[in-house]
Amino acid sequence: MASTSDFRNGLIINHKNNLWKIIEFLHVKPGKGGAFVRTKLKNIKTGQVVDETFRAGEKIETVRIEAREFNYSYNDGQFYYFMDNETYDQISLNSEQLDDIKDFLIENTKTTIAFNGDEPIEVRIPQHMNLKVKQTDPGFKGDTAQGGTKPATLETDLVIQVPLFIEEGDVLRIDTKDKRYIERVK
């Protein structure tokens, strides 16, 4: 058992018979009354985000997770297949388990899968990834980085806004958390 003083972003706890990941938290000590901790929790199974308040020092049950390295192999339309880098075992996950990241999965993407026992509960990908532009409107001479943006379709069919000078075939560094353009890779 842990207490609210052990809270940190990314900690997974068992609360109300569900697994929750702490997205953010704030210790509050009001002038009147007892201290408490305000948290934003994300349900591991459903993706639901809720605000929850705990009394300072309240006991909580943390979940011990094991993280292993996997490579994304392929998608057959219904399941996404990953291969363990050490044992070469394959596991399959359905698209609901990958809602946040499936726009970034290309063959051989290195991922980290967190397990609670034998159950995969979370798939993590790198914060920044390089993806190729599959389709975008042409840029014209004189377009500058400060000028404006246009939509571009990446190799994973994700559509993001990019500067006007980006052309088809360019490789872009993308922030996977915010789904936004960072820079063009040389």
Image (cartoon, rainbow, N blue to C red):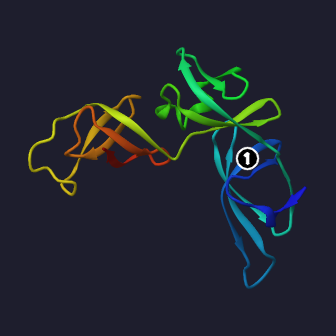
Task: Give the residue drawn at x 73%, y 85%.
Answer: 31
Where residue 185 appears, as percent x and y from the top left, is 33, 44
Where residue 128 appears, as percent x and y from the top left, is 47, 46
The amino acid pointed to by label 1 is Trp
Query: Quick one: label 1, few (<14), some, or many (20+) residues within 10 Å?
Result: many
Quadrant occupied by the N terminus: bottom right
| 7 relative to 152 in the view: left or right | right
| 75 relative to 90 in the view: left or right | left
* Residue sticking out furthest to the top: 76
Given residues 150 and 71, the one toward you in this image is 71
Task: Give the residue drawn at x 64%, y 24%.
Answer: 83
Please say if 25 is above or below 16: below
Disc 1: which residue: 20
User: In which quarter of the view is residue 80 placed?
Assistant: top right
User: In which quarter of the view is residue 95 placed?
Assistant: top right
Where residue 166 appears, as percent x and y from the top left, is 23, 42
* Residue sticking out furthest to the left: 141
Please say if 152 is above or below 72: below
Quadrant occupied by the C terminus: top left
Given residues 57 and 179, the one toward you in this image is 179
* Residue sticking out furthest to the bottom: 31
Given residues 170 and 13, the one toward you in this image is 170
Task: Give the residue drawn at x 27%, y 39%.
Answer: 151
| 163 relative to 73 in the view: left or right | left
Where residue 137 appears, as percent x and y from the top left, is 19, 35
Task: Give the residue drawn at x 39%, y 47%.
Answer: 180
* Residue sticking out furthest to the right: 1
